[in-house]
Amino acid sequence: MKILKIFFFIGILFSACGQKTSNFKSDASYDFTSAKEIPPPLSSEVDELKLTGEKDKVENIPQKLIKIATISVEVNDYKTSRPLILQTVQKYKGYISGESENRYSSQISNSFTIRVPKENFDSLLEEISTLAKEVTSKNVNLQDVTEEFIDISSRLRNKKEVEKQYLEILKSAKTIQDILAVNEQIRQIREEIDAKEGRLKYLESQTSFSTINLSVYQHLGTDYGFFNKIIDGIKGGWQGLLVFIVGLFYLWPFWLILGAIFYFVRRYLKRKKMNKQLENQEVKKEQV
């Protein structure tokens, strides 16, 4: 009986999308022993899609493109350029999702991660280029995820249909074993549904808002003062000393082995010296 129930649950999981809910008895007198009447499981989830035709229902969705641009620009004055960049981003209804500023003796730089609506992506990218003294590098990458979006949407519809069938079966379950078995199948289906819904949300976010990785920098010149050079030298020397000390601690196994070798060699030489002294004393005694 248990084997028939297991075949029944597997058959329902893969064939439910090819049948309508009316194929199952919805009243409380559903017979769990009728597993012999369930069609054999489908060979793959792709066959499941062909039977349901759900893929055809979502093929008319608009093209889904993930746009990512990486651009590096040099500016004349960073202090004035940064506010202009922020205003330009707001102008095109974008926002800064990440920012990392670095200041060195000869250069100041900032890396922005900009998120902007897909329809404003090209305009914002072009206007940022006009604010720069020079565009040193620029790369735009387009990734078409339309097919993946359609495929996941179709599979998600199918999984939800299977979940409905299991919920109907749960209403007809009479024994604790049947209830637990159906609940376990529902739990697995729900995990798959949550994963696919999460992936769809991620794709929707990446396609509705494009990403611009902007690097802005300004050269401050090499002649920045004698004392500043001394300060940089002290900082560099201190950092080098810290790296050296930390490196010594990383070599603790080596120091442990070296200490053990030194101990045993010293002990060996000490014993050898004592033995030699004893031999000399014995020789003197014999002479006397």
Image (cartoon, rainbow, N blue to C red):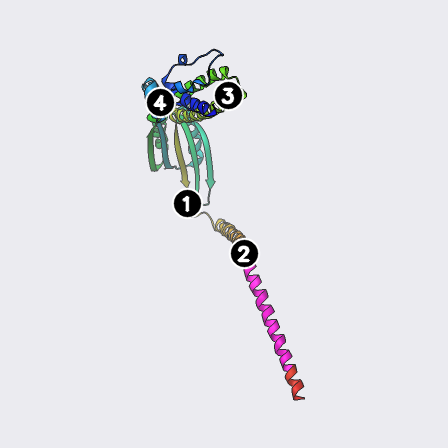
Q: Earlier in the sequence, mark 4 or mark 3?
A: 4
Q: Which residues are magenta?
A: 252-280
- For the point 56% across and 64% down, which residue is it? 261
Where disc 1 sits, the SS reads loop
Mark 3 crowd level (few <14, some 14–19, many ≥20, 10 Å Cα): some
Rounded to the nearest angstrom, the CA distance separating label 1 from label 3 is 77 Å
Q: Residue furthest top?
A: 27
Question: To which residue does mark 2 refer?
Answer: 253
Residue 262 counted in the magenta span: yes
Choose mark 3 or mark 2, whichever is in front.
3
- For the point 49% across and 21% down, which residue is it? 182
Rounded to the nearest angstrom, the CA distance separating label 1 from label 2 is 46 Å
| Cβ–Cβ under 8 Å for marks 1 and 3 | no
Where disc 4 sits, the SS reads helix
Q: Taking 275 as reference, is 223 left or right?
A: left
Residue 68 place in picture, x, y as percent: 36, 31
Mark 4 crowd level (few <14, some 14–19, many ≥20, 10 Å Cα): many
Question: To which residue does mark 3 refer?
Answer: 178
Where disc 2 sits, the SS reads helix
Question: To which residue does mark 4 refer?
Answer: 48
In this rendered view, identify the residue nearer to me: 12 or 228: 12
Three-letter amino acid code at disc 4? Glu
Choose mark 4 or mark 3, whichever is in front.
3
Choose mark 1 or mark 4, whichever is in front.
4
Rounded to the nearest angstrom, the CA distance separating label 2 from label 4 is 60 Å
Q: Is residue 267 something one can see in this rendering? A: yes
Residue 250 place in picture, x, y as percent: 53, 53
Question: To which residue does mark 1 refer?
Answer: 221
- For the point 51% across and 52% down, which residue is it? 243
Q: Earlier in the sequence, mark 2 or mark 4?
A: 4
